Image (spheres, rainbow, N blue to C red):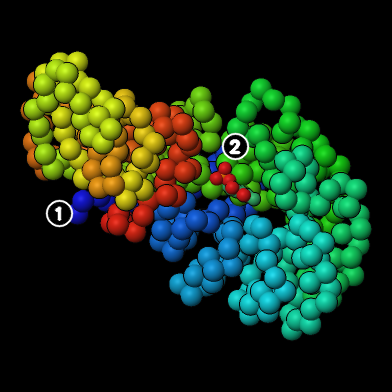
Amino acid sequence: MKAATASIDLNALEHNLNQIKSKAPQCKVMSVVKANGYGHGLLHIAKHSKSSDAFGVARIEEALQLRAGGIVKPILLLEGFYSSGDLPILVTNNIQTVVHCEEQLSALENADLETPVVVWLKVDSGMHRLGVRPEQYQDFVERLHQCANVAKPLRYMSHFGCADELDRTTTVEQTELFLSLTDGCEGERSLAASAGLLAWPDSHLDWVRPGIISYGVSPFADKSAKELGFKPVMTLTSHLIAVRDVKAGESVGYGGNWTSERDTKVGVIAIGYGDGYPRTAPNGTPVFVNGRKAPIAGRVSMDMLTVDLGPDAVDKVGDEATLWGKDLPSEEVAEHIGTIAYELVTKLTSRVAMEYV
Ligand code: PLP
């Protein structure tokens, strides 16, 4: 029996991709599969994303892994390349790149490439992380147009900083700025990731770039994936390796930071921070065991965690426990831990068995 298994539901993935298509029917879809397909398995996810028109990754190694695995659809480096030595690799492997800064533009201008590279000019429309500032925009467009190493037409993109916060005006401002800068441009444009796709239709444009929602996780704090019509793709399970009597007043685990107020039964589950389950999960974080939520009781250790099963528990060694996924949304677990589900799913370690169903 495997200690911990991440079961990846490929039918749920297909369902989510269909939902995406139905919410932005006029758009092409660039599925974001960086960070090992958000922890779901880069190649498996790409191979089963049949309706996706392209893939977005963060690192050149991820793009190469996709090509080596037989993926022939367009691939975009969402942060662009990191050094001029990467440019011939982009050409050889037909990988598209973002350009967001002077260093990248100069590298392209000074290169001698066999074939021009498809370039997406990344505009800083207000997130102030990556992208050319509005006052630099015209100069970048002109130089990219003149550059023989850049395929024409040029493409244009930007990224939202707060699209998950529906009561803020930031996304409208970012959209307006991006639209006004790129007004009349000849190439394709892209703005929306998951939250933009779901909540800000004006941002749909030519390409949407969903990541998290394809994996069935909501980008919004106050709206579940289920309410939005999406299904969790990853379900993380382990099992009970001990069910123990703990008496009122006794403390459990390292530091003894949980003390039982009653005689109870504590379940020990074979998953810990060595598997990527966060050590920071506080007492009370839910784990789904035999049809109900059992709260974490005691500090998460490297290979195990402990839950309060209650005084009348009849759970047995070997019974399954779901850490997140079907029956227990990862968003709910993340909220207890003070993080986001993006972090939970991407941080599993290689000790967790991956199973594709
Ligand atoms: N586009 C870019 C440039 C990104 O950096 C990301 C993720 O961080 C995405 C799209 C996908 O975002 P999400 O997972 O929120 O859909």
Instruction: Kindly identify the residue that appears in the image at 61 percent across and 39 percent down.
Output: 197
Q: Mark 1 and mark 2: span between their CA atoms? A: 38 Å
In the drawing, does residue 232 fall left or right of residue 308? right
Q: Secondary structure at mark 2?
A: helix
| Residue 43 is at least partly visible in this image | yes
Q: Is mark 1 within 8 Å of ligand 1?
A: no
Q: With respect to residue 155, does 228 lie above or below?
A: above
Instruction: Kindly identify the residue that appears in the image at 54 percent across and 69 percent down.
Output: 61
In the drawing, does residue 345 fall left or right of residue 181? left
Instruction: Kindly identify the residue that appears in the image at 76 percent across and 57 percent down.
Output: 100
Disc 2 packing (10 Å; few <14; some 14–19; many ≥20): many
Q: Which residue is mark 1?
A: 1
Image-quadrant location for residue 96: bottom right
- Circle 1 or circle 2, nearest the eye: 1
Q: With respect to residue 260, does 231 lie above or below?
A: below
Q: Is mark 2 within 8 Å of ligand 1?
A: yes
Front position in the image: 40 or 269:
269
Q: Amino acid at mark 2?
A: Ala
Q: Secondary structure at mark 1?
A: loop
Residue 94 location, x and y as percent? Answer: 63, 74
Q: Amino acid at mark 1?
A: Met
Residue 336 location, x and y as percent? Answer: 40, 28
Instruction: Kindly identify the residue that appears in the image at 46 percent across and 58 percent down.
Output: 36
Residue 306 location, x and y as percent? Answer: 22, 34
Q: Which residue is mark 2?
A: 195
In the drawing, does residue 220 fall left or right of residue 202? left
